[in-house]
Amino acid sequence: MTHYISVSAKEAANLRKTTKAVKPSKATVKDTVKNSYLKINEPFKNLYNIDLAEALAKFPEIGLTKSKTKVQKQKETRETVRRMKNKTE
């Protein structure tokens, strides 16, 4: 795991040194964020007994939301269809 973090840090440093026109690739950004999250999440979870992602999702000003499960989406779809059907009848 440390190897990936050092690679990402080196790539980030190289990108900062280059001109502003160069943008990091999506893969580089994704890898950096994933490694940062994995590094921070475990101590956070041990301290507060909740995942960092769940804690961040509780603050609407951040703009993160917890995705709905397949069952929740199906239930909402059924309810919407019922409402529309009842309105048309």
Image (cartoon, rainbow, N blue to C red):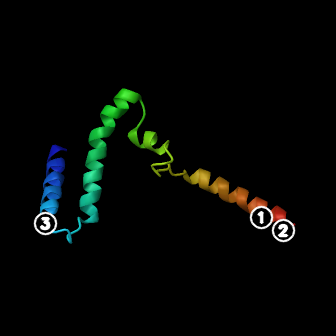
Determine the image quadrant of residue 81. bottom right
State if disc 1 and disc 2 touch (CB < 8 Å): yes
Q: Nearer the viewer, mark 2 or mark 3?
A: 3
Q: Nearer the viewer, mark 1 or mark 3?
A: 3
Q: Where does the image place residue 62, in percent across and percent down from the top left?
A: 45, 49
- Does 15 sit above or below residue 35? below
Disc 1, SS? helix
The residue pinned by badge 1 equals 84
- Cα distance in 3D space between marks 2 and 3: 62 Å
Mark closer to the chain start, 2 or 3: 3
Disc 3, SS? loop
* Left or right of residue 7: residue 74: right
The residue pinned by badge 2 equals 88
Q: Where does the image place residue 21, in percent across and percent down from the top left?
A: 21, 72
Residue at (54%, 50%) from the top-left corner?
69
Q: Dot 1: within a 10 Å radius of its alpha carbon, few (fewer than 14), some, or many (20 or more) residues?
A: few
- Does 19 sit above or below residue 6? below
* Left or right of residue 16: residue 76: right
Q: Mark 2: which amino acid?
A: Thr
Q: Where does the image place residue 76, in percent across and percent down from the top left?
A: 66, 55
- Does 62 sit above or below residue 27? above
The residue pinned by badge 3 equals 18
Q: Quadrant of the N terminus?
A: top left
Residue at (25%, 53%) from the top-left corner?
32
Determine the image quadrant of residue 48. top left
Q: Quadrant of the C terminus?
A: bottom right
Mark closer to the chain start, 1 or 3: 3
